[in-house]
């Protein structure tokens, strides 16, 4: 009986690892020529979709992923490669208003307030990408986040009929960066699970014109 249980556990683990490997390969391969580190080589899009994250870590320090995404969005805007920035993030609790935090820091770094639009219902990357099309009317976008995140967002965009490229914010190294990347492998697998089960954004709502 014990051998049978161990055998089943081995099969399940093998399938999980295989799923993670395949998911990662498909997403990375598709996005390989659609992510850019240099503002001079990326094409221009009307809107840059800035994917949200918390401004502060549990320790109270600035989240480096947040800071580097702000820097990337500012660089892209000032290079004339986007005309507007759509900040999509979580605003589900009183203490966590990702879009407004980003907007305030973008303005501090020289992006005019009228060039910034906020999506408060970007609870997941899927929500952010789908809402960029369905609510904000964009069929071609530049995603702004770290490379690993951009790759997943670009693949999701393909699934939902959005043409997307990604501008890579500086990545984060060390133990914290490793933990985030390990979670990303599971998130990539979940892309295909969500596709199978037809998962949709939590909220849609009224359309917003970006102009």
Image (tube, grey):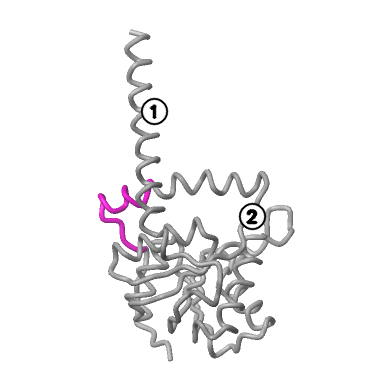
Q: Is mark 1 on a helix, strand or loop?
A: helix
- Indicate the position of residue 65 as horizontal and vertical percent values: 62, 60
Q: In which quarter of the image is the C terminus?
A: bottom left
Toward the viewer: 31 or 93?
31
Give the percent coordinates (x, y) of residue 98. Answer: 57, 68
The residue where tag 1 is placed is 13
Considering the numbered disc 2 on the image, is that residue within a helix, a strand or a loop?
A: loop
Q: For this rendering, which residue is in front, 114 or 203?
A: 114
Residue occupied by mark 2 = 172
- Of badges 1 and 2, the one in the foreground is 2
| Dominant secondary structure of the residues highlighted in magenta in the image | helix
Please check the rendered image and state whether residue 150 is part of the magenta-colored stretch, yes or no.
Answer: no
Please provide percent x and percent y for residue 152.
42, 57
Name which quarter of the figure residue 68 lies in: bottom right
The Cα atoms of the two marked residues, 1 and 2, are separated by 29 Å
Q: In the image, which disc is placed on residue 72?
A: none
Taking depth in this image into account, of 126 and 150 the one nearest to the observer is 150
Residue at the spot 39% in from the left edge and 84% down from the top edge:
208
Q: Residue at x 60, y 73 (%)?
A: 102
Tell which residue pokes out farthest to the front in this image. 41
Whole-percent x, y for residue 189 in the image: 38, 46
Give the magenta part as a residue range.
Answer: 189-201
């Amino acid at each position: 009986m014990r051998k049978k249980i161990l055998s089943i556990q081995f099969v399940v683990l093998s399938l999980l690892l295989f799923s993670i490997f395949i998911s990662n390969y498909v997403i990375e391969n598709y996005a390989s020529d659609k992510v850019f580190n240099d503002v001079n080589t990326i094409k221009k899009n009307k809107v840059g979709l800035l994917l949200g994250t918390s401004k502060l870590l549990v320790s109270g320090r600035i989240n480096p992923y947040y800071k580097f995404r702000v820097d990337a969005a500012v660089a892209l805007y000032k290079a004339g490669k986007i005309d507007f920035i759509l900040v999509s993030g979580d605003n589900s609790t009183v203490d966590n208003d990702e879009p407004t935090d980003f907007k305030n820091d973008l303005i501090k770094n020289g992006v005019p307030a009228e060039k910034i639009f906020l999506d408060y219902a970007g609870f997941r990357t899927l929500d952010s990408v789908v809402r960029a099309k369905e609510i904000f009317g964009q069929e071609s976008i530049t995603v702004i986040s770290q490379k690993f995140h951009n790759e997943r967002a670009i693949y999701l965009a393909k699934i939902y009929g959005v043409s997307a490229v990604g501008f890579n914010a500086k990545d984060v190294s060390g133990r914290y960066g490793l933990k985030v990347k390990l979670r990303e492998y599971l998130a990539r697998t979940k892309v295909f699970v969500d596709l199978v089960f037809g998962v949709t954004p939590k909220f849609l709502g009224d359309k917003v014109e970006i102009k």
